[in-house]
Amino acid sequence: MKYTIIKNPLSKGEKKNYIAKRVDPIRHDMEELVEKITADGSILKPTETNAVIYAYWETILNYIENGEEYADDFLSVQLNISGVFEDIKSRFDRVEHEVKVTFGTGIIVKEHARRTKPQFVELNLKQPVIKSVYDWQSDTSNQYLSPNNACELKGHNLKFYEEPIGQGVFIINAENQTEYAVESIKANLPRTISFRVPDLPKGHYIIEVRNTNRNRSCFRKGSTDFELIIQ
């Protein structure tokens, strides 16, 4: 796992502190997972493997829908209620309150995380670096996104090109890795990109810029090291 050290954008005052930032993280999807499980030498088949995975999550989703929690050696699922109640006689109202689902890590996952060997690398300033995300509707930085409203990225090496394909701004759900390509771009400059946030569901998101250098010879990407909330 490669990382570098950058200034903490949330630290205040004259004395700045620093945080680690992942460099070129590798992210796998379910299709790759199934291919890995059913590779040559495995007795498992893709159809049966997909069926078991979906049955596993469908059962957990049924637990959640019934207000029940779940835990095993790999993950835990907890339910809570967010929102403010005016007094002790107040009751749950879906307009004012929301059931929140929190996924935690089990002991086996934590043990494997402890075995990970982070490797420090110098930050390549040629890659896109997102320093701040300003949301016009909420008038906040690095906190919220407002669907169908303006958003502005500030940083370095942000400008992208039409060719080759695959470049642009992408908003990625931090929980399930679903990604949404931003289509309405208002400004596309090396230090600033402004755009209209797509109509996305509630959740926690990261923003990623994918582009190439000027001669189109090197594909690169950079993402926020903080999550943004859609309420």
Image (cartoon, rainbow, N blue to C red):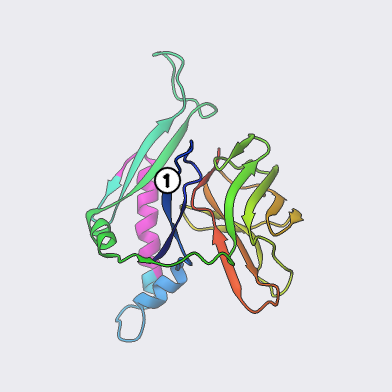
Residue 208 position in % (x across, y down): 58, 58
Q: Position of residue 172 (x, y in %)?
A: 55, 55
Query: Which residue does the image show at 44% across and 31% down from the upper left?
Result: 82
In percent of width and height, residue 17 lies at 42, 45
The residue lying toward the viewer, choosing from 93 and 199, is 199
In the picture of the structure, the residue carrying the numbered disc 1 is 17
Q: Residue furthest front?
A: 14
Residue shown at 33%/41% (left/top)?
78
Extent of the magenta region: 50-69
Q: Is residue 1 left or right of residue 180?
A: left
**Residue 140 found in image quarter:** top right
The one nearer the camera, 144 or 216, is 216
Question: Is 200 or 143 nearer to us in this picture?
Answer: 143
Residue type, label 1: Asn
Residue 139 position, x and y percent, is: 64, 34
Q: Magenta-highlighted stretch: main secondary structure?
A: helix
Q: Is residue 186 above or below residue 212?
A: above
* Image quadrant occupied by the C terminus: top right
Quarter holding the N terminus is bottom left
Give the residue drawn at x 76%, y 54%: 187
Residue at horizontal 49 percent and vertical 64 percent from the top:
123
Element under disc 1: loop
